[in-house]
Amino acid sequence: METTFDTFITNNPEEKALFDKEYNDFLLSEFVLEKMEQEKISVRMLAQKAGVSPTVIQKIRSRNAERINYRTFSSVLNSLGYKICIEKI
C-alpha cells in the first residue's frame, strides 16, 4: 500500500531531491552529534582539534552545513577518529 508520502515523493521529482538532500544533511549532523557525545567532546574542543571555528561545528550540528567544503568536513570527521570513504553503490 502506497502512503501519501510515497505518492508525494514519487510524483514530484523536485520534492524528492529536496527530501534526499535534507535527509543526508540530517544523517551527517546526527552522526557528528552522536560521536561528540560518545567522545565527550565540546564544540570548542572539536573545533580546536579540527582547526576550524566553533561556528563551523555549530553549522554541522544544526544541519546547516551546505556551505562547508569537503576538506573542512573531512577534518572534523578525522578529529573524531573517522574518515570519509567513497564507494560505488
Image (spheres, grey):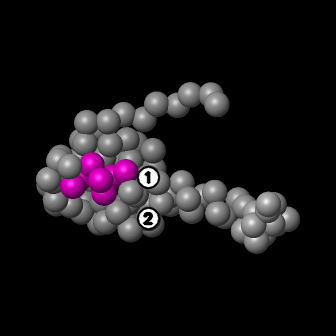
Please state which of residues 65 and 6 is positioned toward the viewer in this rendering.
6
Secondary structure state at the residue bearing disc 2: loop
Magenta region includes residue 76: no
Q: Earlier in the sequence, mark 2 or mark 1?
A: 1
Say what amino acid the circle numbered 1 marks. Leu
Residues at circles 2 and 1 in contact by the CB criterion of under 8 Å: yes
Query: What kind of secondary structure does the magenta stretch mostly adopt?
Result: helix
Q: Residue 87 at what x, y percent from top left?
A: 56, 28
How crowded pointer 1 is (Cα within 10 Å; few <14, some 14-19, many 20+) is rated as some
Secondary structure state at the residue bearing disc 1: helix
Please state which of residues 56 and 26 is positioned toward the viewer in this rendering.
26
Residue 16, can we see it? yes
Please state which of residues 61 and 71 is positioned toward the viewer in this rendering.
61
Q: Quadrant of the N terminus?
A: bottom right
Q: Residue 29 at what x, y percent from top left?
A: 40, 58
Write down the quadrant of residue 78 in the picture: top left
Say what amino acid the circle numbered 2 marks. Arg
Whether residue 19 sits left or right of residue 10 in the image: it is left
Residue 13, can we see it? no
Write down the quadrant of residue 3 in the picture: bottom right
Give, as a single range, the part of the protein colored magenta: 31-37
Outermost residue on the front side: it is: 1
Whether residue 34 sits left or right of residue 43 in the image: it is right
Q: Is residue 62 above or below residue 82?
A: below
Disc 2 target residue: 63
How crowded pointer 2 is (Cα within 10 Å; few <14, some 14-19, many 20+) is rated as some
Please report the residue visible at 31 percent of the width from the left and 66 percent of the height from the top.
58
Q: Residue 70 at what x, y percent from top left?
A: 45, 44
Q: CA distance from mark 2 to mark 1?
A: 8 Å
Q: Residue 81 at what x, y percent from top left?
A: 25, 36
Disc 1 target residue: 28
Please report the residue visible at 35 percent of the width from the left and 63 percent of the height from the top.
61
